Amino acid sequence: MEDSTVQEDIEKVLYSQADIQATVARLGKELTTDYQGKNPLFICILKGAIVFMTDLIRQVDDFVEIDFMDVSSYGNATVSSGEVKILKDLDTSVQGRDVVIVEDIVDTGATLNYLIKLLSTRQAKTIKIVALMDKAAGRKLPVKADYVGFDVPNEFVVGYGLDYAEKYRNLPYIGVLAPRVYEQ
Ligand code: XMP
Ligand code: MG
């Protein structure tokens, strides 16, 4: 049994449901313009980007295809291990495709650095990154998202798909986790 509620574990709300909705709509408009007639393949990076992906594609007003990939660099810690491994690969070939990687948050850049190299090797025609959040202070590799929802402070955030030890993904907003949750 938990001794606190989901809401009590959130120290502060960074982005409300309304903030997220407006930002996702803005990103969807930009992608609609930039990918007109290109039938891009949106690759959702599991599990964190799942909520963002499902909202985002409904804001793109043209043909898109989707696929999923699960990579891991984190484990249950709030600090990146820097190591990336594939837990689930794509079903679709990216060869000759305009690929849009859909990521929840760019931190050290290790995940995206790895994915860009991998998808280039597989001969994607173009590779762009849409990240709901960019934690620039965490960057260790020179990775830049092409579309960014929010520039976030260097804090551990959860909700709207993002977890801590698999919890909090179902929160409809994004918040900062109370440090006591991971310090205990
Ligand atoms: P890297 O370091 O590879 O990290 O850029 C990207 C992945 O790390 C996870 N991550 C977070 N997850 N709250 C989370 O729930 C955070 O504040 C956070 N920072 C990084 C995330 O899975 C992302 O895909
Ligand atoms: Mg992730």
Image (cartoon, grey):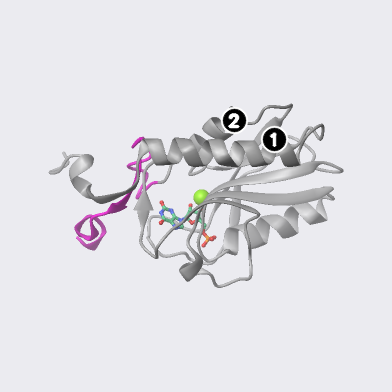
Residue at 52%, 42% in the rendered image: 49
Task: State how many labels appear.
Answer: 2
Reading the image, the residue beneath label 2 is 59
Q: How many residues crowd around disc 1 within 10 Å: few (fewer than 14), some, or many (20 or more)?
A: some
Say left or right for 18 vs 97: left
Judged from the image, the secondary structure of the residue bearing numbered disc 2 is loop
Mark yes or no: residue 90 visible.
Answer: no
| Residue 173 sits inside the magenta stretch | yes
Tell me the residue that label 1 is attached to.
32
Mark 2 is on which residue type?
A: Gln
Q: Amino acid at mark 1?
A: Thr
Q: Specify whether residue 56 is painted magenta.
A: no
| Residue shown at 41% from the left, 65% from the top | 79
The answer to whether residue 13 of the structure is visible from this angle is yes
In front of the other: 83 or 5:
5
**In which quadrant is the N terminus drawn?**
top left
Graded by Cα atoms within 10 Å as few (under 14), some (14 to 19) or many (20 or more), the crowding at tag 2 reads some
Which x, y percent locates residue 133? 49, 53
Which residue sits at x=82%, y=41%?
97
Side of 19 where 180 appears, left or right: left
User: Where does residue 60 sit, x and y in percent of width and height?
Assistant: 65, 31
Percent x, y for residue 27? Answer: 59, 41
Inter-mark Cα distance, 1 to 2: 8 Å
State which quadrant residue 179 falls in: bottom left
Region in magenta: 163-184
Give the camera-side residue of 157 and 2: 157
**First in residue order: circle 1 vs circle 2:** 1
Image: 80 above or below 163: below
